[in-house]
Amino acid sequence: MTLEDYNAYDEGQVVTLAMSFVDRDGAPFSPTSILVQLRDPVSHVVTEYDETDLQVIEDSEGEWHIDVDTRHFSEGVWAYKVYAEGDSASAREWAFIVKVSELT
């Protein structure tokens, strides 16, 4: 992927990270556990969230999301990875860009 492929957000926006889970037959399923890792592009500190956190929300069978408040985020490419366990274990990685205003 190139930088043009990533969604870009202004620092301070709430970014919704949507997650969909399907089993081997393509049917939606809700994992028994979810782990979301978010990596800072500058310090490379990884923050982890799981299904017990208030931020990780199940919208419907197989559909989850987490809202990430980007206030005070560093500028750059923020990588995140989602791990799911259950009937069908999976892992997937994505990224998004945070742009910091020159006015702050």
Image (spheres, helix red, strand yellow):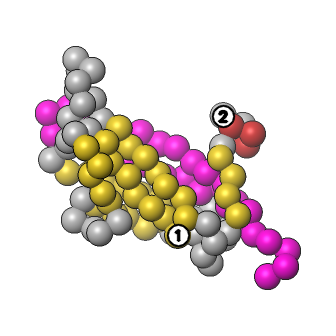
Residue at the top extreme? 25
Q: Is residue 69 magenta?
A: no
Query: Is residue 20 shown left or right of residue 39?
Result: left
Whole-angstrom CA distance, mark 1 to mark 2, is 24 Å
Q: What secondary structure predominates along the stretch shown in magenta? A: strand
Q: Residues within 10 Å of mark 1 (few under 14, many from 20)?
A: few
Relative to residue 59, is residue 22 depicted above or below?
Answer: above
Name the residue type under label 1.
Asp
Q: Residue 7: image x %, image y %? A: 65, 47
Disc nearer the start of the sequence (1/2): 2
Quadrant including the C terminus: bottom right
73 and 58: which one is in front? 58
Which residues fall within the magenta stretch? 75-104
Residue drawn at (23%, 24%), measured in percent from left and top?
A: 27
Q: Which residue is mark 1?
A: 69
Residue drawn at (41%, 39%), measured in percent from left and top?
A: 92
Q: Residues within 10 Å of mark 2 (few under 14, many from 20)?
A: few
Q: Which residue is mark 2?
A: 1
Q: Is residue 97 magenta?
A: yes
